[in-house]
Amino acid sequence: MVAVEAAPITLRFAPLVDYTGNPNSRVFSGFLTIHPVITTATLFTHYRGEPSWDRAGEGHAFQYGIKYPRNDRIITRFEWAHLPGDINPAEGNRAMIDTRTAPYATLALRVTLGILFLAHDGLKFFVFTPAGTAKYFASLGLPPALAYATMLVEFMAGVSLILGIWTRFTALVGIPTLLGAIVTVHAANGFFFNNPNGGWEFPAFWIVALVVQALLGDGALALMPTPTFAKWTTAEA
């Protein structure tokens, strides 16, 4: 048991969406208001690894049979609070994604994809030259101007991904160039990329990685995070 100070102290906390599927579970994360009445609270564990608190009131029992007193506007900082409807940590379940490292994994993917775009854009610009690339596009029956548009998209996508500028949107914008490469060049060469003239294996994998990036979001160290839909609707209102 942990004794809680009597002095009233209001500390920051943020509401979380109920992730348990249990409508009776109201989860808050962070530090909470300490009630001016001395009380006690029990530290207990929860598999998500986040400070949590359930303010359900008198008679509300946790899975471990722990109850708060009626004046439970507490309390102290909890480490890993276990709430009704959550997975029992005794069963060995853990959160599927480590939220401590996920932003940096997303950053690594984002920068890698950006470098790939810049590398292929540099190949077209410095090795094949813009004129040579346009001529190659024409040999495929495509408008030569599409070569310049492709190089521009690859350059902008590469820079934006590396810097973290509207990452979700940028990742999706880069997909059509790869789809075009599959349809016009690589599809006829089979699946494996080490086939003569290259199969569609690598550009398809690249597309999947871009979709994953769009789903993950900006990651750490993003210069201009992608606006959320909620922000757009708020701005329009």
Image: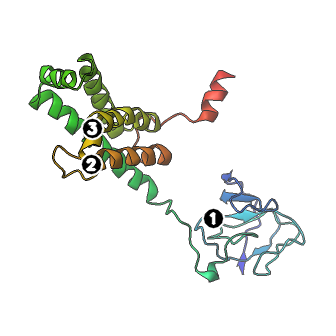
Mark 3 = which residue? 117
Q: Report the quarter where the C terminus lies.
A: top right
Q: Secondary structure at mark 1?
A: loop
Residue 19: image location, x then y, percent? 68, 59
Task: Using residue 65 as the reference point, say whether residue 12 is left or right of it.
Answer: left
Residue 217 visible in rendering: yes
Task: Using residue 93 as the reference point, say whether residue 21 is left or right of it.
Answer: right
Q: Residue at x 37, y 44 (%)?
A: 207
Task: From the viewer's side, name the closer residue of 100 and 8.
Answer: 100
Mark 2 = which residue? 190
Q: Secondary structure at mark 3?
A: helix
Q: Secondary structure at mark 2?
A: loop
Q: Report the quarter where the N terminus lies.
A: bottom right
Mark 1 = which residue? 51
The image shows a total of numbered marks equal to: 3
Q: CA distance from mark 2 to mark 1?
A: 52 Å
Kind of residue sitting beneath label 1: Pro
Q: Is 237 situated above or below 34? A: above
